[in-house]
Image (tube, grey):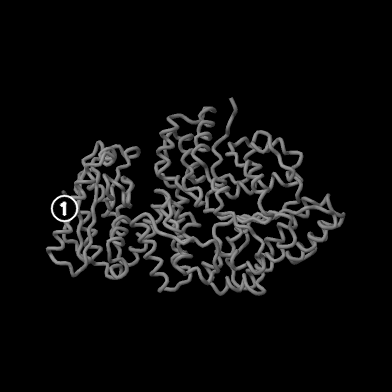
């Protein structure tokens, strides 16, 4: 039986994975498809989807220095039996721009970037020195400017007839940090006119036979387009929908591999069922809406690592490293520090948290100065993995929260936002949720939340309305992980506002579950109008509770049907039906 050291969690270098006998999800069948595309390609995917290890694999496959290691690294993979004529024929220059310093302003920024590029180019000269003249390595080392180093390599490679392949990981990290930390003016200076970053990309344009770049947003590329305008964006091409991330088939094969090698016990199908609501459901191409959804790589390996090491699911289904990703929401919400735009973006975030979905006109590129536009902002939420494709309406895309992992990021961000405006005692709220969960004492929690909602006058101005009230309640209900707070769940030919679905796999002792119907009326609504609205809510709750799925999800618990009714910011009803 083959010996496996551990789960390759956090390992991004392809060569190390293959040398140390880690399991590798085989994505090599995409290499011929990439070769069939234009020579200069660009792909956007969210963080933690395996971009770096894929680019490392590409580097190994195309690098002439690895020609004698082809069977070692690729012999047991798909491409080992289907090699292309392009294999191991390039001199590969590999940049990871997330490692280029970007915290210093002004001229130091250019120096930092130049120093990083210079080090990488010097390493290139060292590795490929045998293919060039005797003084090649020392000449490049003696050139101060990284741009001039590149120009010298271009001349010598053409002179010798060697094809060059440029691979850039995190192509936009450098400028995205500039945009968020130093503002649009510095970003504009870098990427327009004679900005040094733009000048690098102009030089790439005519130098390399092939270019492949990956990042997480299209902002930088649009601003560089007048200098570097030869890319072919394959981000929404259905051919490459599943190239990053894991399909369900790949997850199952990986889990079976570790069970075969004696490292994994338990029911694999049950594990996949448990993982799906948390890590699955990504789609990156409209034409792939009816195809299998994609799992997040990082979270899948995080779960698998716990099952292998502890023979159980992790105590927290969301990796602590993922929890910090909601800072991206904060950056996106305040990216231009304009309070007018910030309000509209916050309304978008609250709507998504409340309903779980939103309509998007997906923009594949846009300049930084237009990042505040609401359609561009919604597009960025998609590119950062905070939304995913789930349907269409006419020529627009319906985007939804992919899974519980991302939903927690929205709720965590909103809680922080609300807490800054009107601080609540979160420890006390958790006590009330405990009472709601285990004792069925639900009224104190909702009365406390209604009082807080009314007292939050600043919030009231921006979130008054049913959708925003839903987001407010759900953000605080998600403080505890006993329930999966499902928005707009279809039940018995209707949609309940939200169902507190007990997570029985992790908390088998949960005793109570809830169907909530939230009714919102304007401050001018009359008592008779309120009564008619409440009657409709009671009928809906009775209808929802007869649903077979609702009964199945609530099995083993006492199911409560709750009607919450607000007139403006005042709760006028909080009753069980």
User: Residue most toward the left?
Assistant: 528
The residue at the point 50 percent across, 29 percent down is 259
The image quarter in which residue 338 lies:
bottom left
* Camera-side residue of 514 and 466: 466
The residue at the point 23 percent across, 48 percent down is 436
Label 1: few (<14), some (14–19) or many (≥20) C-alpha neighbours in 10 Å:
some
Residue 342 is situated, as x and y percent measured from the top left of the image, at 41, 69
Residue 448 is situated, as x and y percent measured from the top left of the image, at 22, 58
**Left or right position of 271 against 519:** right
User: Residue most toward the right?
Assistant: 134
Element at label 1: strand
Judging by the rendered image, the residue that carries numbered circle 1 is 575
The image quarter in which residue 355 lies:
bottom left
Residue 327 is situated, as x and y percent measured from the top left of the image, at 45, 60
User: Residue most toward the front?
Assistant: 394
* Camera-side residue of 158 and 420: 158
Residue 525 is situated, as x and y percent measured from the top left of the image, at 17, 67
The image quarter in which residue 112 lies:
bottom right
Q: Quadrant of the N terminus?
A: top right
Q: Is residue 528 above or below residue 301?
A: below
Q: Is residue 240 above or below residue 379?
A: above
User: Residue most toward the top?
Assistant: 1
């Amino acid at each position: 039986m083959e010996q496996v050291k551990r789960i390759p969690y956090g390992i991004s270098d392809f060569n190390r994975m293959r040398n140390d006998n880690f399991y590798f999800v085989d994505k090599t069948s995409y290499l011929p498809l990439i070769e069939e595309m234009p020579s200069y390609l660009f792909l956007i995917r969210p963080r933690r989807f395996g971009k770096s290890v894929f680019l490392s694999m590409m580097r190994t496959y195309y690098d002439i220095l690895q020609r004698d290691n082809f069977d070692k690294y690729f012999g047991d993979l798909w491409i080992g039996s289907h090699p292309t004529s392009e294999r191991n024929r390039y001199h590969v220059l590999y940049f990871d721009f997330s490692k280029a310093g970007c915290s210093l302003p002004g001229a130091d920024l250019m120096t930092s970037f130049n120093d990083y590029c210079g080090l990488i180019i010097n390493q290139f000269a060292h590795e490929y020195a045998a293919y060039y003249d005797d003084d090649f390595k020392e000449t490049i080392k003696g050139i101060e400017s990284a741009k001039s180093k590149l120009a010298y390599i271009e001349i010598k490679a053409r002179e010798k007839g060697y094809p060059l392949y440029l691979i850039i990981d995190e192509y936009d990290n450098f400028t995205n940090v500039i945009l968020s930390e130093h503002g649009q003016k510095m970003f504009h200076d870098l990427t327009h006119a004679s900005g040094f970053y733009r000048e690098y990309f102009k030089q790439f344009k005519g130098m390399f036979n092939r270019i492949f770049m990956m990042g997480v947003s299209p902002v930088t590329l649009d601003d560089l387009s007048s200098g570097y305008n030869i890319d072919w964006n394959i981000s929404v091409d259905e051919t490459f929908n599943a190239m990053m991330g894991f399909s369900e088939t790949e997850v199952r094969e990986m889990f079976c591999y570790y069970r075969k090698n004696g490292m994994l016990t338990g029911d694999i199908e049950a594990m996949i069922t448990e993982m799906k609501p948390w890590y699955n459901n990504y789609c990156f191409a409209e034409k792939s809406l009816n195809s299998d959804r994609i799992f997040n790589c990082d979270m899948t390996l995080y779960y698998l690592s716990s099952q292998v090491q502890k023979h159980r699911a992790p105590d927290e289904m969301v990796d602590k490293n993922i929890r910090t990703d909601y800072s991206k929401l904060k950056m996106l919400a305040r990216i231009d520090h304009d309070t007018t735009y910030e309000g509209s973006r916050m309304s978008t975030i609250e709507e998504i948290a409340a309903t779980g979905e939103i309509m998007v006109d997906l923009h594949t590129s846009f300049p930084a100065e237009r990042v505040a536009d609401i359609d561009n902002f919604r597009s960025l939420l998609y590119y950062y993995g905070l939304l995913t494709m789930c349907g269409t309406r006419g020529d627009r895309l319906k985007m939804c929260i992919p899974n519980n992992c991302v939903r927690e990021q929205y709720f965590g961000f909103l809680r922080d936002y609300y807490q800054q405006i009107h601080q609540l005692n979160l420890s006390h709220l958790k006590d009330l949720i405990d009472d709601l969960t285990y004792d069925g004492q639900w009224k104190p929690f909702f009365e406390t939340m209604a009082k807080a909602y009314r007292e939050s006058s600043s919030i009231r101005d921006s979130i008054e309305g049913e959708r925003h009230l839903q987001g407010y309640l759900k953000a605080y209900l998600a403080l505890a992980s006993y329930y999966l707070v499902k928005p707009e769940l279809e039940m018995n030919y209707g949609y309940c506002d939200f169902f507190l679905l007990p997570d029985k796999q992790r908390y088998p002792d949960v005793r109570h579950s809830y169907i909530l119907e939230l009714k919102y009326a304007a401050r001018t609504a009359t008592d008779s109008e309120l009564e008619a609205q409440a009657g409709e809510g009671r009928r809906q709750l009775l209808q929802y509770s007869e649903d077979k799925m609702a009964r199945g999800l609530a099995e083993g618990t006492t199911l409560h049907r709750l009607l919450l009714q607000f007139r403006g910011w005042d709760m006028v009803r909080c009753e069980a039906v």
